[in-house]
Amino acid sequence: MSALDSIAVQAEYETGNVVPLLHEIRHALERLLNGEDGAVIDMRSLPLAPGEEKRIEDALGKGEVHADLDALGPTTILETSYPGVWLITHRNTEGEVIGRFIEVTRFPSILESQPEDIRTGLTALGNRLAEDSA
Amino acid sequence: MRKDQNLGEYLRTQGVSRRGFLKFCSATASLMALPPSAVAQVAEALASARRPSVIWLSFQECTGCTESLTRSHAPTVESLIFDAISLDYHHTLQVASGEGAEEARHAAMEENDGEYLLVVDGSIPLGNPGYSTIAGISNLDMLKDTAKGAAAVIAVGTCAAFGGIPQAFPNPTGAVSVSDIITDKPIINVSGCPPIPVVITGVLAHFLTFGTIPELDHLGRPTAFFGQTIHDRCYRRPFYERGQFAHTFDDEGARKGWCLYELGCKGPTSYNACATVKWNEGTSFPIGSGHGCLGCSEPGFWDHGSFYKPISAGLWGSKETLLGAAAAGAALGIGSAMAARARKKKAIKESEADSS
């Protein structure tokens, strides 16, 4: 145990923002189910006490889908234990968090293949086949 | 990045996929404190953004503002934003010096007349031109000369925005802010000692994205970052509402993380984004570490009495302080905004008289 660990700090931090956030997510889920737009919540915009972000994560839990994206650094996309609620964490190439969002949607758009990338891939595939047949 | 390329083209040449670009836009929108729904708009605008020329002038400053920015999380978002601007002059960072550096500044001014962005950190001394010079040019002359052809000016740090520490009583150099000198250009004040790095890049990103200056408050600060007080967004606010305060830095309240108001926290009167954006890659901010806010983003913060007395003790010093200072024949600790303003006006008048 380090000297710092021996300091008796009893954190009682709580902004009271965790439960309202869960209600906000519940309302967004209801809208999504009714065919309306869901919601994107920027975690950076919320005043959260130390430990509250973890409490939100714990409250949301983990669901069936876990995807990793490698574009300008890693991104993790987790479906929480509540289907339709996704936790998306963008990191830079040094692994530092540059954005954290809760997305209420059927499928996070960041996972979709983009037309520009499909076009580039199509060209690359065409070139490869041309080379192979040459 | 070539000058004829837009940002979208540049990123594709760097092997950045559209998906990566959208990720960059999400982080940039978050950086600019825009709602996540604005990501598509940011993506469209950023993809066609041209590379603006930026001239950065450092006057009476400690280089803390530049340090804050260059030591922020270096890769990805910030570096891409920096790749997307053409930083044509920054005497601390550039390799060139002396006449070579000044030639680069003049070349950038000529080539981008009316379109370049001027960033200034540090206050401007009016007391004596020799107090602060660059390549033998006084700060005042360099600012006036460079601001002429600028599209907008960003005053980075409390010194450039409001005079800052150089202007603190007794203001020996006659320090003034950028807006005391330049009155015919849009000025964005990004105050803080130093400012939060992502706030600096957020303002640059806004200019890059929309080609306009963001919405500003009555002190010329972007409302996206300075629209609410530290107190409004502080996680310790519930303790304030319940009247639970730390009275010393080691009492039970301090250990339990209660409100630091009675220990001098200036959060209720300080507008900044520290409580949400935080520092050191979003790790913490002063209140998170158990120390009250100093109010460093506010005008005259250094002269607002003790950092360790509550705001209710009086921003301009208690009666006892004023009387004590008067009796001692020194105005130590008074430093009111009015007095600071009077000193500034006097310095400007004297400077104008000298130059006429």
Image (cartoon, grey):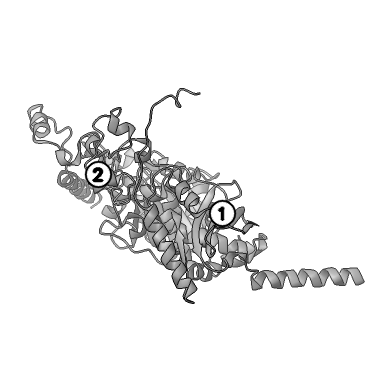
Q: Secondary structure at mark 2?
A: helix
Q: Is residue B64 above or below residue A111?
A: above
Q: Is residue B204 above or below residue A96?
A: below
Crowding near the residue tagged with mark 2, few <14, some 14–19, many ≥20 C-alpha atoms within 10 Å: some
Query: Which of the two residues, B275 or B226, is positioned nearer the viewer here?
Result: B275
Q: Position of residue A76 (x, y in %)?
A: 59, 55
Residue A27 vs residue B13: left or right?
Answer: left
Q: Is residue A21 above or below residue B252?
A: below
Tell me, yes or no, whether dots 1 and 2 are on the same chain: no
Mark carried by residue B107: none
Task: Name the subunit of mark 1.
Answer: A
Mark carried by residue B240: 2
Q: Which residue is mark 1?
A: A62
Q: Position of residue A102 (x, y in %)?
A: 49, 59
Gap between marks 1 and 2, in whole Å? 35 Å
The answer to whether one can see residue B316 in this image is: no
Residue B177 vs residue B59: left or right?
Answer: left
Quarter of the picture holding the N terminus of chain B: bottom right
Q: Position of residue B101 (x, y in %)?
A: 50, 48
Q: Residue furthest right?
A: A134
Name which quarter of the figure residue A30 lies in.
bottom left
The answer to whether one can see residue A25 in this image is: yes
* Amino acid type of the residue that numbered disc 1 sits on in the rendered structure: Lys
Q: Secondary structure at mark 1?
A: loop
Query: Which of the two residues, B110 or A107, is positioned nearer the viewer here?
Result: A107
* Amino acid type of the residue that numbered disc 2 sits on in the rendered structure: Tyr
The residue sitting at 84% across, 68% down in the picture is A128
Q: Is residue B137 above or below residue B7?
A: above
